[in-house]
């Protein structure tokens, strides 16, 4: 999750402080002190260099290595054989690779769509609540953001077990025919782990959207009411446009969390049963570290990174255009 | 929000929704607690109030999960990662934003690009880099990659802070004859305290909860992060639901307590961490 949040911040970067940026062409204000700063600016590299060196060695270099590995067949120890685009062909042809990619898109429904939809409804309906209890309750919604996802995975595995609480509750309300070992069910295992994603993200989305709604000018609602707008029209005309930025953040965070999910799936199903919940992250891990197929793992890794970029960059443009 | 609009039914719907959401959020923890209090070695049932309760399961789990060792290991990793990551990111952002190094905009974009890289994308080469450096199964093999992987966010975060500091301040410092180092220490760092402490909260939380890097770099679960240890604990006791639940709750307890105590700071940090701009 942490990673997803990092990405979201990046997505909003261009909106963060345009104009106060580094590379602003030398305006009149700066000309006077320019000479004095020029000598100093090279000294500035002493401040930037350590971070850049660490970053280059342990992020940029592995990035190029991932790309390089993806063109080879390598077991991690012996000699590597050049195989050209074979590993990529596998990603887009092998049913288990394709299934992993497809599942990460299916998870978007639970991680992004459900979290944001519930978050919007909940934020709209709870915005008038201001008591101490309401605030304490909202804080509780953050708990899934704080505990390790592995812990969440363990807890949910137990909820979904044959003797677990979900089946117990279903039996109690007379839906005994629905009970099953959820994570062993070929059709329902993926939705089951998807709901965990909703559980993790819905609190964050609700709170983000709540803070966004609190910033909307009440006069806009009054105006809408004068125009005869009902609650639904009001929602689409005032609330939704008012939380555009927060929506973009929620969307970025949850999309990345879906595409790059690992901890929850690894803990709960390891991609099973029979690949029904396999996702790219777990696939990469197993290819690289269980099957010693470094090339295939790297091709999957490159595709995953490209996929995330393909999702984040357009969102970034949307935010930039609208704000 | 004008009060006129707030009908009573709306307030009650809101309360109801909130209660349902909180129940949904707490359900996994409650079901875990219920399992943890049932008879050791038994097949627990999902949600029940066990009578008699068996709180001694927690004592057993405390010993078997080696909770103090785990906490020590995670704390050590946080100490290895967070100060270094904070220092590097702050210095870089200061150089880019305040000292305006030539090429700084490009460097910033290169850092920003790193924000979009999922850890899974780099984990395989990082493993081989650490192996070749002879660092596998040592804590630096976890700490060094994390410092680097957290860098884009840190630089982005601190740059956002520094670009909000009035330029006149730096000019004044420079006219006073303060070098860039002194200006950073005596002028900029004191002002950066809130931004730095939020970043420290986020970095600590991410390190404590980091799973993938710990799993790959360290075979010994006792020298991993809390999340990594939890994964191993599940692998070992996955069939003993009572012990697993007690152990997992114990391992997560410190985070929950720290969160409960510093909830305001955490909520603010998590929200800002998403939106910062």
Image (cartoon, grey):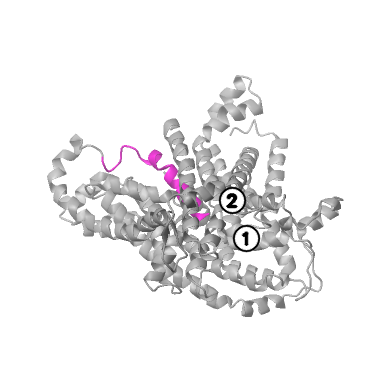
Task: Name the quarter where the C terminus of chain A is drawn.
Answer: top left
Q: Position of residue A22 (x, y in %)?
A: 27, 43
Q: CA distance from mark 2 to mark 1?
A: 12 Å
* Residue bearing the label numbered 1: A270
The chain containing the residue under callout 1 comes to A
Q: Is residue A172 visible?
A: yes
Image coordinates of residue B239 in percent, x first then y, are 71, 71
Q: Which mark is residue A100?
A: 2
Q: Is residue A206 left or right of residue B85?
A: right
Q: Return the x and y of residue A155 as percentages of the image width and height.
A: 67, 62
Circles 2, 1 touching at the beta carbon (< 8 Å): no
- Vertical order, A233 against A140 (above or below): above
Vertical arrangement, residue A219 with respect to residue A71, above or below: above
The subunit letter for the residue under badge 2 reads: A
Tell me which corner region of the image, top left, top right, bottom left or bottom right, holds residue A152. bottom right
Q: Looking at the image, is mark 2 or mark 1 nearer the viewer? A: 2
Task: Check residue B22 for magenta coloring.
Answer: no
Is residue B268 visible in this depiction of the protein? no
Secondary structure at numbered mark 1: loop
Measured along the vertical axis of the image, is residue B9 above or below residue A194? above
Query: Residue at coordinates 19% horizontally, 50% vertically from top-left?
Result: A41
Q: Main secondary structure of the magenta part?
A: helix
Query: Dot 2 lies on which element?
Result: helix
Q: Give the residue displayed 46% in from the left and 56% down from the top.
A: A298
Query: Where are the magenta residues, as a range?
Result: A1-23
**x 42%, y 50%: residue:** B115
| Residue sitting nearer the eye, B69 or B254 | B69
Foreground residue, B204 or A230? B204
Using a 10 Å C-alpha cutoff, classify the residue at mark 1 as few (fewer than 14 neighbours), some (14 to 19) or many (20 or more). Answer: many
């Amino acid at each position: 999750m942490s990673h997803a949040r990092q990405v979201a911040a990046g997505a909003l970067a261009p909106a963060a402080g345009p104009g106060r940026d580094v590379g602003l062409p030398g305006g009149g204000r700066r000309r006077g002190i320019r000479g004095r700063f020029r000598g100093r600016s090279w000294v500035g590299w002493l401040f930037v260099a350590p971070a850049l060196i660490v970053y280059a060695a342990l992020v940029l270099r592995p990035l190029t290595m991932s790309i390089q590995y993806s063109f080879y067949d390598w077991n991690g120890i012996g000699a590597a054989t050049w195989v050209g685009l074979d590993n990529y062909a596998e990603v887009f042809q092998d049913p288990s690779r394709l299934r992993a990619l497809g599942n990460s898109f299916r998870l978007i429904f639970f991680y992004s769509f459900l979290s944001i939809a519930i978050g919007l409804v909940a934020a709209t309906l709870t915005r008038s609540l201001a008591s101490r209890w309401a605030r304490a309750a909202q804080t509780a919604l953050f708990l899934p953001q704080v505990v390790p996802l592995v812990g969440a995975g363990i807890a949910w595995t137990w909820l979904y077990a044959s003797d677990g609480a979900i089946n117990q509750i279903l039996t109690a309300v007379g839906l005994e025919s629905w009970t099953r070992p959820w994570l062993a069910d070929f059709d329902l295992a993926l939705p089951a782990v998807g709901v965990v994603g909703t559980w993790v993200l819905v609190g964050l989305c609700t709170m983000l959207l709540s803070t966004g709604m609190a910033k909307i000018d009440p006069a806009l609602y009054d105006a809408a009411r004068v125009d005869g707008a009902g609650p639904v029209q009001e929602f689409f005309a005032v609330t939704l446009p008012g939380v555009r930025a927060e929506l973009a953040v929620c969307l970025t965070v949850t999309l990345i969390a879906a595409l790059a999910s690992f901890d929850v799936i690894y803990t709960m199903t390891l991609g099973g049963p029979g690949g029904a919940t396999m996702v790219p992250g777990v696939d990469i891990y197993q290819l690289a570290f269980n099957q010693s197929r470094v090339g295939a793992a790297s091709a999957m890794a490159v595709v995953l990174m490209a996929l995330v970029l393909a999702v984040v960059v357009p969102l970034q443009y949307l935010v930039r255009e609208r704000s | 929000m004008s009060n006129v609009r707030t009908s009573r039914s709306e307030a009650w719907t809101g309360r109801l929704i909130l209660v349902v959401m909180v129940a949904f959020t707490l359900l996994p923890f409650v079901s875990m607690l219920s399992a943890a209090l049932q008879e050791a070695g038994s097949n627990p049932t999902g949600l029940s109030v066990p009578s008699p309760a068996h709180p001694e399961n927690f004592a057993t789990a405390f010993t078997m999960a080696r909770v103090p060792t785990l906490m020590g290991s995670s704390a050590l990793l946080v100490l290895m990662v967070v100060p270094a990551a904070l220092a590097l990111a702050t210095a870089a952002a200061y150089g880019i934003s305040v000292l305006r190094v030539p090429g700084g905009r490009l460097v910033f974009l290169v850092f920003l690009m790193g924000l979009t890289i999922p850890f899974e994308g780099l984990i395989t080469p990082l493993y081989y880099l650490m192996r070749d450096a002879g660092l596998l199964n040592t804590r630096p093999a976890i700490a060094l990659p994390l410092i680097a992987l957290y860098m884009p966010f840190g630089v982005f975060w601190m740059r956002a802070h520094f670009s909000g500091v009035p330029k006149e301040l730096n000019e004044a410092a420079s006219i006073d004859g303060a070098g860039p180092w002194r200006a950073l220490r005596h002028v900029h760092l004191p002002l950066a305290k809130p931004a730095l402490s939020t970043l420290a909260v986020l970095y600590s939380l991410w390190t404590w909860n980091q799973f993938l890097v710990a799993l790959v770099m360290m075979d010994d679960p006792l020298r991993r992060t809390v999340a990594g240890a939890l994964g191993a604990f599940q692998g070992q006791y996955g069939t003993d639901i009572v012990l697993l639940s007690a152990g997992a709750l114990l391992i997560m307890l410190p985070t929950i307590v720290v969160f409960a105590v510093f909830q305001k700071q955490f909520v603010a940090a998590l929200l800002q961490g998403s939106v910062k701009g």
